[in-house]
Image (cartoon, rainbow, N blue to C red):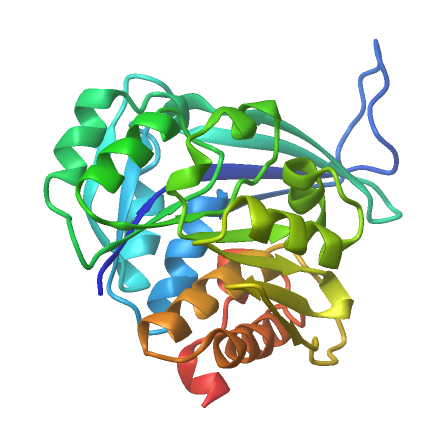
Amino acid sequence: MRVLNFGSMNIDHVYRVDSFVRPGETKAASQLATHSGGKGLNQSIALARAGVEVYHAGKLGKEGGFLIDLLKKSGVNTDNIGVSEFPTGHTIIQVDDSGANCILLFPGANADIDDTFAARVLCGFGTGDMLLLQNEISGIEPIMRMAAQRGMVIVMNPSPFDAKVRSYPLELVDIFLLNEIEAEGLSGETDPERAASLLGQRFPAARVVITCGARGSICMEKGRLIRQKAYPAKAVDTTAAGDTFTGYFLAGLIEGLDAGRAMDLASRAAAICVTRVGAADSVPLRSELD
């Protein structure tokens, strides 16, 4: 099974400051680091490192070529990445001395996905292929409808969650991958198990997976609740833990594992990820788990 990840790609500019800039204030940053980012890019790299045949689709500005190089180096097919007249999506991130952060996101080329581009990408995929979506690009609803018409398995990770998510044709989704905030946004329930139960009733044909940080993860599948522990790890950076879980969970399913064993695989990968600094760079290789 091939995976088409129609997702975001960002350039992250991270500034180290003693405290966040206040209105009207000019402040000197002590450090600047530039990283690759975007949930779409991170998840494509996680899928590739887990051993999946993955194709990334999306748009970059003219200055975003190094993100394509990173995807290629990680084993991701980049034939479906287009060039936009808009700049590459990017973030301005302030990190203060306590480790807290505040983030300004400019969607840029990620918001330049129209129906024509989506149709051109999707014409190369069909029954037996999987579509993975997050909530960081434009055109999600038509992409979902076109993918369903082509018989693709649709996976939705609605991150970052906002009111638009509820307007998407969620009845077309085969697998939901949610954190606790996203699960609450869709269900109205703060308790993950109640949220999984409610969403399982609302979407009985779908798998509903909810990650709960150090408390592990759960999956509602055909009325049955599956629980998976989190593996203990000394966390130094949790940035790409959810994206790593996504990539390895889907890899497990594609290999024929049941949901429980796929969650165990994903939990082990996420535990390695959080012991490393960075986003895409912290995603482990499959050989590290084996």
Where residue 63 sits, quadrant-wise, is top left
Name the spot of residue 139 as percent of width and height, x first.
35, 25
Residue 81: x and y in percent read 23, 39
Q: Which residue is drawn at 66% across and 55% down?
A: 197
Residue 1 visible in image: yes
Q: Is 137 above or below relative to 254?
A: above
Instruction: Give left or right: position of 74 versus 24.
Output: left
In the displayed image of the protein, which residue is found farthest to the bottom? 290
Residue occupying the point 63% across, 38% down: 186
Indicate whether 42 appears above or below 111. below
Instruction: Tell me if 158 is positioned left or right of 114 in this view.
Output: right
Q: Which of 118 and 182 is in front in this view?
A: 182
As displayed, is residue 259 above or below residue 127?
A: below
Residue 181 versus residue 258: which sits nearer the camera?
A: 258
Q: Quick one: quadrant of the N terminus?
A: bottom left
Residue at the image point whose x is 74% and y is 54% from the top:
194
Residue 219 in percent (x, y) is at 59, 65
